[in-house]
Image (tube, coloured by chain):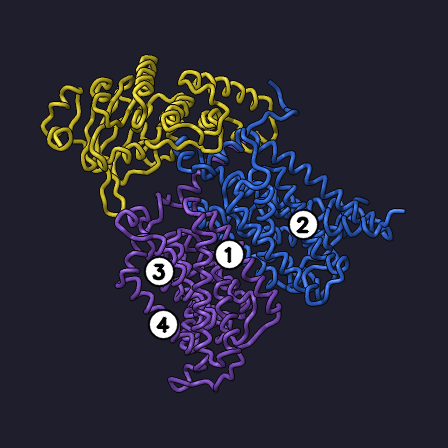
Amino acid sequence: MVVQFLFNGLVQASIVILGAIGINLLYGVKKFANFAHGDMMTLGAYFTFVFLGGTRDLMTAAIWAVFVVALAGVVQEVLIYARLENRGPVAPLVASIGVSLVMQNSLTTYFGPAFLSYGIRYPDNWVFFGGAVSTNPIRDLVPMAVAASATTATVVLLKYTKLGKAMRATADNRDLARVSGVNTRVVYWMTWILAGVLASLSGSVLGVSIGTLAPSMGATLLLTMFAAVIVGGIGSTTGAILGSLVVGLSQSLFFLVSLVSGLDPRWQIAVPFALLVATLLVKPTGLVGRPIGGEIRPLRTEIAEMLKGIRRGLF
Amino acid sequence: MLLLEVDGVSKSFGGIRAVDKCTLEVEAGSIVGLIGPNGAGKSTLFNLVIGTYSPDVGRIVFRDERIDGMPPYEIVERGLAKTFQIPREFRSLTVLENVMVSARGEPGESPVLSLLGLRRVWRREEELERKSRDLLALIGLSELADEPARNLSGGQKKLLELARVLVMDPSLILLDEPVAGVNPTLSLKILSLIEDLRKSGKTFFLIEHDMNVVFNRCDRVIVMHQGRVIAEGKPAEVRAHPAVLESYLGG
Amino acid sequence: MVDLSLVTDLSRAWIAPAFIFAIVALGLNLQWGHAGLFNAGVAGFFGIGAYIGAIFTTPAIGPGPGGPGHLGLVSLFAIFTPYTVLIAFLVGGIAAMVVSGLVGLLIAIPTLRLRADYLAIATLALGAIAVESIRNSDPVTGGVYGILRIPRPWEFGQDVWRTELAYAITAGVIVLLVFFLIQRATRAPWGRALKAIREDEDAALALGKNTYFLKLQAFVIGAALMGGAGALFAGLLRVAVPDSFTPALTFSIWTMVIVGGSGNNKGVIVGAFALTFLEYFTLRAKDWFNLSSFWDIRIFYLRLIAIGLLLIALILFRPAGLVPEPRKVTKKPWILFGSR
C-alpha cells in the first residue's frame, strides 16, 4: 500500500512540477512571483477544451492551447511587465493579481461557473507488482509521461542551448548580461513563452487527470506550486523539481497517515503550507537554492531583537 | 585613546573573501583615510563595523566594548554612524524628514507613544526639528528642506547623507566616499565641515579615492588590497610604502 | 414618507460593508501603504476575526448545522446585565483582534527577515489555509454550514431599517475611532520610521532603526484591525460561512487601498466606499436594469474583471493612487495628552 501512495505522490508531483518550473523561471528572470500562474494553467486547460471541439483529438488540442497560452504570456510581458521594470518585486506582483482576476473571471464569464469535461472515457486500471500498484493509464500515466518529458526538455534547453545560457545569465545579473550582448528583451519573451508552454501543458494534464475543468482549477494549485518552489529553493530549476517531488510525496503520504491515524484527510491542504513555513523557518533558501540578495540573519537573532524591543518597552 | 579596533576580521560571500583577516585601529579625534583599489573590501569593512554584516571571524571593539554581531541599531546607539557611498535617501520623504527620521532614541518611534499623542513626544519632535533645520542650514540645504529628497542633485544628496549622520550625534562617523562625484566647490565645503567637526571632538574614518583629499586631510591612512590591510601610517609614509606603490598608486 | 426599505438596503448592503472594509483597508494600508509589507492573506485574517467573534458571541444551538462548540457569551452575560449582547460583542471583537494579531505575529516572525515577496507567498498560503481550516473544523466552526444566528447589538424588532442603520452607524463610529488612532500613529515619528523602511529598508537599518521590530509592529497591528473588522462583518451578515473569505476579497481590499492611494488613510476609506459601491451595484443591477438571467449570474465575474483591470491600470499609470499621500509625513495632532 505504501508503494501505491508513493506512486500517487509522483502523479501529484507531476502536475505541480510544470507549473513550479514556470514560476521559478519567471522568478529568476523577471524577479517577481507570478500570482497569475495558476490561471495560466486554467487558460491552457480551457483552450484545450475549445480546440477539442474542432480537432476531436486531445493531444492536438493541447498543442494548440500551448500556442495560445505562450502568446498570452508574451502579451502580458509587452503590455504590463515590460513597463514595470525597475519598480521592485512588488509592483509586478500586484499587477499579476490583476491579471489573475481578469483571466479567471473572463473564463468564468464565457464558459460559466459550472464544471466542464473533456469527455474522456477512462480505461480500466492497470495493475503492477502483483497488485501493489493499481494505476489508470490515462489518469495517472499520461500526466507522469508529459511531466517527465517536458521537464527533461526544459532542463536540456536551459543547460545546453544558447537561449538557456542567455536566460541563466539574465537571471544572474541582468545588467551584466545586457553588457555582454544578451538581448534581454528577447530573453524575457522566451521566458514567458517557456513558462506559458509549461503552464498550458500542466493545465491540460490536470484536466485529463481529474476529469473536470473549473475556472478556479489552476488558482487552487497556486499555493502548492509556491510551496514546491520555496521548499526546493527559489531560482533553481533543480530546486523546483525536488520541491515538487517533496510536496507531492508528502501530500500523498499524508493520506496514508490520515488513513492510519483517523485524521481528517481534508487537512491534506495544510501539508504544502506546513512545508512552506518549515522551510522559511529553517532554511529560507530551500533545499538547493542560492542565497538571494543580502544576508539573511538567523531567526534566533531576529526573535532576540523582537524580545529586546518588547522588553525595552513599547512605551 | 583608541576609539575603534578591528581585530582579525574576515568575511566571505559565496566563497569569495571580501575582507581577509583585517586588523586596524582608529584613534579618537582623528581623521583616518581608507584607500584601496575597487573591490579591496573597503565598503564591506564599513558594513561589518556598522553591523549590516556580521564578521565570520574576528573582533570589532568600539570604546572597549565588542560590537561585532550586534544589530546595527545597537551599534548606532553606541555612537557610530555611516554614510552610503551611493546616497540612499528616503525618496518620498522630505529633506527635513530624511534628517529627522535618522535621529536616534526618539520616543515617538514607539507606536503606543505616537498613538497617544503625548506632549513630551511632540516637544522632543519640535526640538528635533529645530536641530535638523540648523543642520540643514549648516550644510546649506535650508531652502530645500520641504522638498521630497528625490528632487535633490547628486551632490546635494551627499550633503544630506552627512546631515543624516550628524543628527545622530555620533562620536565616530564612517564616510563612504564623501566627495566622490561632487563638484570642487561643494567638495571643499564638505571637507572644511569635516575639519570643523573634528575640532569639536568627532572622529572620522573615511573611504576616498581622491588622493589629494586623503593625503592632505587625513592624519593617518590605511591601505587595503584584496581584503587585507597592506600598509598604514602617516600620509607621507604610506605614499612611500613599496607595497602601496606597487599595488595601487603605481598602477 | 421616505421609503425605509431603501435605508435598510443601503445600510445593509453598502454603507455598513463599506465601513467594515474601510477598517480592513486601513489595516492593510498600515502594512502596505506605510510600511511596504505585502499581505496576500487579508481574507484569512478577516475570516479568522469573523469566526472568533462569532464563536465568542453566539450561543450553542446543539448538534447540526451551526452546531456546538461556541462560547456563547451572550447567554453567559445575560445573568449579570441587560447589556449582554453589547458586552459579548465587544469581548468578541477584542478577542478577534487578539487572535488575528497573534496569527499575524506567527506568520511574520519567520518571513519578515526575507525579501518582500516571501511575505506575499507566505500570507497567500496563510489565507488559503485559514479558510480551509475553518471549513474542516466542523465541531468548532460548523464546517461548510458555518455559524448561524450571530447576535448583534441594537436590534429593533420589526423596524428593520433601524436595526440596519444602527449597525451601520456603529461601524461608522468604529471607523472614525480607528482612523483617528491610525492617523495619529502614522503621522507621528512612528509612521515616519515605517515610511523610511518602506522607501529603503537597508538604509533604515544602517541608520539604526530596528527595522524588524518596526515591521512586526505594523504587520501585527494591521492584522489585528482586519480581525476586528471580521467580527463586525460576522455581526452584519449574522452568519459566518467559509465562502465569504475568498482570495477575491483580499484582492478587492487591495484595490481599495491602491485606488485610495497607498499611504493615505483618508483616500483608503474613500476607496473602500467606491469599491463596495461597485459590489452593491452588481448586486442590485438585476433589479435596476432588468438583466437576463445569463448576465445576472455573470455580472459578479464582470465586477472582478473590472477590479483586475483597475489594479493593473493603477499599478501602471497611477502607482500613487488617485489621492496621493501627503508630502510631509508628520503632523502635530490637535489634541495632545500628558504633562510637559
Amino acid carrying mark 1 in the image: Ala
Residue A272 left/right relative to A114: left
Q: Colour of chain A?
A: purple
For the residues labelled 4 and 3, the Cα–Cα distance comes to 15 Å
Q: What percent of the width, then of the height, locates residue C193?
A: 49, 32
Amino acid carrying mark 2 in the image: Thr
Give the mark nearer the N terminus: 2 vs 1.
1
Disc 3 or disc 2, which is closer to the eye?
Answer: 2
Query: How many callouts does the rendering have?
Result: 4
Q: What percent of the width, then of the height, locates residue C53?
A: 67, 51
Q: Which residue is mark 1?
A: C125
Q: Are marks 2 and 1 on the same chain?
A: yes
For the residues labelled 2 and 4, the Cα–Cα distance comes to 46 Å
Count residues near mark 4 (Cα–Cα under 10 Å), then give few for <14, some for 14-19, many for 20+: some
Give the mark nearer the N terminus: 4 vs 3.
4
Marks 1 and 4 close (CB-CB < 8 Å): no
SS class, disc 1: helix
| Letter of the chain that mark 4 sits on in the rendering | A
Q: Quadrant of residue A156?
A: bottom left
| Letter of the chain that mark 1 sits on in the rendering | C
Q: Colour of chain B?
A: yellow
Outermost residue toward the left? B242
Decide which of C182, C199 is in the foreground and name it: C199
Q: Which residue is mark 3?
A: A239
Amino acid carrying mark 3 in the image: Gly
Count residues near mark 2 (Cα–Cα under 10 Å), then give few for <14, some for 14-19, many for 20+: many
| Letter of the chain that mark 3 sits on in the rendering | A
